[in-house]
């Protein structure tokens, strides 16, 4: 009797890297415009809310809810230099250095938590509306030693 084991894996339902990077770039621009107080504040805020909702819909549809936990960190990587520059533009150089430091360290907890909550709510709602996606049959087939 041979001891051969075949392992079959199923790939994840979809890659979320590109949509998450696009969302992070949009959110970096939104946060920059809000802090620098450039453009319509309400319009810019709605762009951020809409972009986050679209990413939440995508993640919920693809059943990739775990990506919600990583998304605020990815957003922070893109947004923190722009947020600091926006603080320098709005508050001047010296005060902007300290305001920017506060925003990219302490203030980011609030920004990231807001993104996490909104993105999570939309993702969970879409995933619940879409359903489990399981047909009831097992994806695993086990052949015993006597099966040919």
Image (cartoon, grey):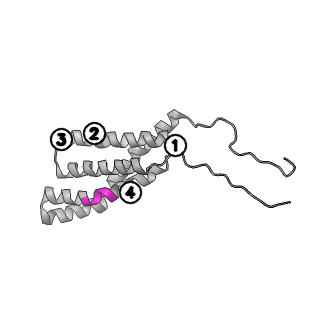
Q: Secondary structure at mark 1?
A: loop
In primary-sequence order, the first of circles 3 and 4 is: 3
Q: Is residue 21 above or below residue 47?
A: below
Q: Residues within 10 Å of mark 1 (few under 14, many from 20)?
A: many
Q: If you read the primary sequence from the N terminus, does the residue marked by circle 2 or circle 3 appear first?
A: 3
Q: Look at mark 1 in the image and give the residue it sits on.
A: 63
Which residue: 77% across, 48% down? Answer: 142
Residue under the image location 33 percent in, 39 percent down: 50
Q: Nearer the viewer, mark 3 or mark 1?
A: 1
User: On screen, 20 above or below 95?
Assistant: above
- In 3D space, how far apart are the residues under numbered discs 1 and 4 (Cα atoms)? 20 Å
Toward which corner of the image does residue 40 lie, by quadrant? top left
Q: Name the residue: 55% across, 48% down.
A: 12
The location of residue 17, given as percent across then percent down, is 43, 51
Is 63 situated left or right of 29 in this image? right
Label 4: which residue? 73
The label nearer to you, 1 versus 4, is: 1
Looking at the rendering, the stretch of residues picked out in magenta corresponds to 77-81
Q: Disc 3 to disc 1, how far (Cα)?
A: 34 Å
Q: Earlier in the sequence, mark 1 or mark 2?
A: 2
Q: State yes or no: residue 20 in magenta.
A: no
Indicate which disc residue 46 carries: 2
Q: Is residue 119 visible?
A: yes
Residue 40's disc is 3
């Amino acid at each position: 009797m041979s001891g051969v084991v075949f392992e079959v894996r199923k790939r994840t339902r979809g890659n979320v890297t590109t949509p998450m990077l696009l969302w992070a770039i949009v959110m970096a621009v939104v946060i920059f415009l809000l802090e620098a107080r450039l453009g319509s504040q309400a319009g810019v805020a709605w762009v951020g809310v809409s972009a986050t909702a679209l990413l939440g819909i995508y993640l919920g549809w693809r059943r990739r809810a775990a990506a919600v936990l990583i998304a605020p960190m990815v957003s922070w990587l893109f947004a923190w230099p722009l947020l600091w520059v926006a603080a320098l533009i709005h508050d001047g150089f010296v005060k902007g250095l300290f305001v920017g430091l506060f925003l990219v360290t302490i203030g980011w907890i609030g920004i990231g938590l807001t993104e996490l909550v909104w993105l999570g709510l939309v993702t969970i709602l879409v995933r619940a509306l879409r359903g489990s996606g399981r047909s009831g049959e097992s994806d695993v087939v086990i052949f015993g030693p006597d099966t040919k």
